[in-house]
Amino acid sequence: MINNPIVNDFLEGIVDADDLKNVKLIIQALIDGIETDEAIHEKTDIKLNTVRKLLYKLHDASIATYKRNKDPETQWFTYTWKFDKEEYVEKITEFYTERLNKRQEALDNLENNLYFVCCMDQEHFKGDYTESSEYEFYCPVCDYELEPYDAKKEKSLLKRRITIDKKNFKKFEDAINKQ
């Protein structure tokens, strides 16, 4: 449920790549029923400030919630954290669906349209037939002719990414259903 490339990509949208390992440890601790930042710190050996920072990021993403209680003796606040599995699954499903749709749309676009690129430097210009005809099939950057774009590699890469994403999401669903 946590160790999956789609989950990694989703979590990297919440935390920096450097914090990915720590946020996964924190999520696992919450799943295991550890509820306070101090207890998570003790179990994971992650700095307490880092634990708190990442818990708040998970809260901002709506996959962790907290309750604040005041200790009557010390007058200190204690935060009790909970992992929201349903929201987590929903957010990852939305992330996956959106990414899959974008990749499928890009693939469909490549398969159904003819693109042209600058013959001197493909980075200068890439446009579909309509856009290229507006420039009379000359590069708007360097004025060299545009040539048909060979999209085989890009199509192949998109197909491979779509297949891998579907496989990884299936593994994620299977892991969720086992729990």
Image (cartoon, rainbow, N blue to C red):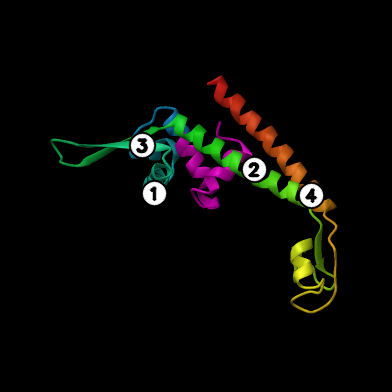
Q: Say if residue 128 shows up in the picture.
A: no
The type of residue carrying mark 3 is: Thr
Relative side of 179 to 136, left or right: left
The type of residue carrying mark 2 is: Asn
Q: Nearer the viewer, residue 133 or 56?
A: 133
Q: Quadrant of the N terminus?
A: top right
- Name the front one of labels 2 and 3: 2
Number of the label disc, if any, that sits on residue 153: none
CA gap, disc 1 and disc 4: 46 Å
- Name the front one of labels 1 and 3: 3
Q: Which residue is mark 1?
A: 53
Q: Nearer the viewer, residue 126 or 89?
A: 126
The type of residue carrying mark 1 is: Lys
- Mark 2 or mark 3, which has the lower sequence index? 3
Q: Secondary structure at mark 4?
A: helix
CA gap, disc 2 and disc 1: 32 Å
Q: Main secondary structure of the magenta part?
A: helix
Q: Secondary structure at mark 3?
A: strand
Relative side of 79 to 126, left or right: left
CA gap, disc 1 and disc 3: 14 Å
Residue lying at 22% horizontally and 41% vertically, measured from the top left:
77
The type of residue carrying mark 4 is: Asn
CA gap, disc 2 and disc 3: 30 Å
- Mark 3 or mark 4, which has the lower sequence index? 3
- Mark 2 or mark 4, which has the lower sequence index? 2
Number of the label disc, if any, that sits on residue 65: 3
Above or below, 29 against 11 in this view is above
Above or below, 133 against 98 in this view is below
Above or below, 1 against 115 in this view is above
Q: Secondary structure at mark 1?
A: helix
